[in-house]
Every structure is written in structure tokens, then in C-alpha cells.
Amino acid sequence: MSLERTLSIVKPDGVEKNLIGEVVRRFEAAGLRVAGARMLHLSRRQAEGFYAVHQARPFFASLVEFMTSGPCFVMVLEGDGAILKVRDLMGATDPAKAAPGTIRKDFASSIERNVVHGSDGPDTARFETGYFFAEFELARRGGAA
Ligand code: ATP
Ligand code: MG
């Protein structure tokens, strides 16, 4: 595996349920390191831009409404195979289909209000990390300068 960075968000429902610590704990327990993090209440434009790949989907307007409904906790995680690791810990989009022990199985209330986001590949990880963080805001640990 290779050292990767990925972007994750504790969505407004997760923040509302006080799950920031629990989500970060699961990521850290899996060996991932937090390279950067902050609270952020997304504007409509920021949410639309972030989820632009979904703009033609029927759920887009509702998704933007949800993502702007309260503050989020955005973070960059770093580690071996970080992108897939985060996706595995999150579980399937629909909590009804998510595997036992995943964040979404344990805490999500619907396919929309599913507590957490994670980049789905190297290209999206790069785009999404740059969407919220400048390089100088990200700590480098575990090697390369
Ligand atoms: P995310 O991108 O947030 O990590 P994902 O990659 O598992 O989630 P996507 O297909 O990228 O799923 O959908 C983005 C988000 O849009 C979902 O996490 C969910 O909040 C919402 N969403 C997806 N499908 C639906 C749907 N059928 N109805 C309502 N909301 C949906
Ligand atoms: Mg996605």
C-alpha cells in the first residue's frame, strides 16, 4: 500500500449527534493520522461545488440543503491506503446496506443523513483536500518532508 491523503467530513447530522470524537477515534484506531481539521458551516455555493458531480441527480437539492443545515467537521486523514480505509470504516451509502460495525451502520439515520463523507478515489481525494485546505495547513508526519 502507499501513503495517501483523503478528505473526510462529519456531516451536520453527525455533528448534531456529537459524533465528531467517535468518528475520529475510529479513524485513529485504524492507524490513520489527522493531518488537518476544522469546523465549517458550508455555504450553499461551497456545498454545490463540493458535490458538483451529483448536480444532475434527483437528490442534489436536498443534499445541498442537508449539508448547509449546520456545521460540519472537515478533516484530512493520512496513512497507508487511507482512501479505501476510510471508505471501509464508513460503510455503504445506505445504512440499511452498510456492514455491521461501520460508522453508517451504527449511526446513520437514512441514505442522505449518513453522518460521514469520504473521498472515493485518488482524484477526488486530491480535489476535495484542496477544496478545504491549503498545503501549509496540513501537517506531515511519518516521513517525507
Ligand atoms: P459521500 O460522497 O458523502 O462520501 P457516498 O460516496 O457513499 O457518500 P454518493 O453517491 O457520493 O455516496 O452520494 C453523496 C451523498 O449524497 C450521500 O452520502 C448521501 O448523503 C446523498 N445521497 C446519495 N444517494 C442518495 C439518495 N438516493 N437519496 C438521498 N440522498 C442521497
Ligand atoms: Mg461520494
Image (cartoon, rainbow, N blue to C red):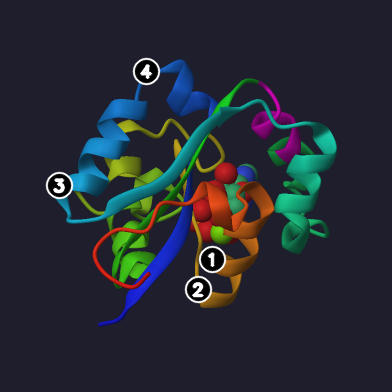
Residue under the point 63% across and 20% down: 70
Report the amino acid beneath label 4. Asn
Residue under the point 28% across and 52% down: 33
Residue designated by label 4: 18
The span from disc 3 to disc 1 (Cα, nearest Å) is 21 Å
Residue designated by label 1: 125
* Drawn side of residue 100 relative to residue 38, left or right: left
Residue under the point 71% across and 51% down: 50
Q: Are marks 3 and 2 in contact (CB under 8 Å)?
A: no
Magenta part of the chain = 64-69
Name the element at disc 1. Answer: helix
Q: Are marks 2 and 1 in contact (CB under 8 Å)?
A: yes
The span from disc 4 to disc 3 (Cα, nearest Å) is 18 Å
Residue designated by label 2: 121
The span from disc 2 to disc 4 (Cα, nearest Å) is 28 Å
Report the amino acid beneath label 3. Ala
Does the rendering let one see residue 114? no
Ligand 2, by image quadrant, is bottom right
Q: Which mark is residue 9?
A: none
Report the amino acid beneath label 1. Ala
**Where does residue 18 sit, x and y in percent of width and height?**
37, 18
Instruction: Choose between 25 and 13: the one closer to the eye.
Output: 25
**Where does residue 103 sit, x and y in percent of width and height?**
30, 42
Q: Which mark is residue 29?
A: 3
Name the element at disc 4. Answer: loop
The span from disc 2 to disc 1 (Cα, nearest Å) is 6 Å
**Where does residue 35 sit, x and y in percent of width and height?**
39, 50
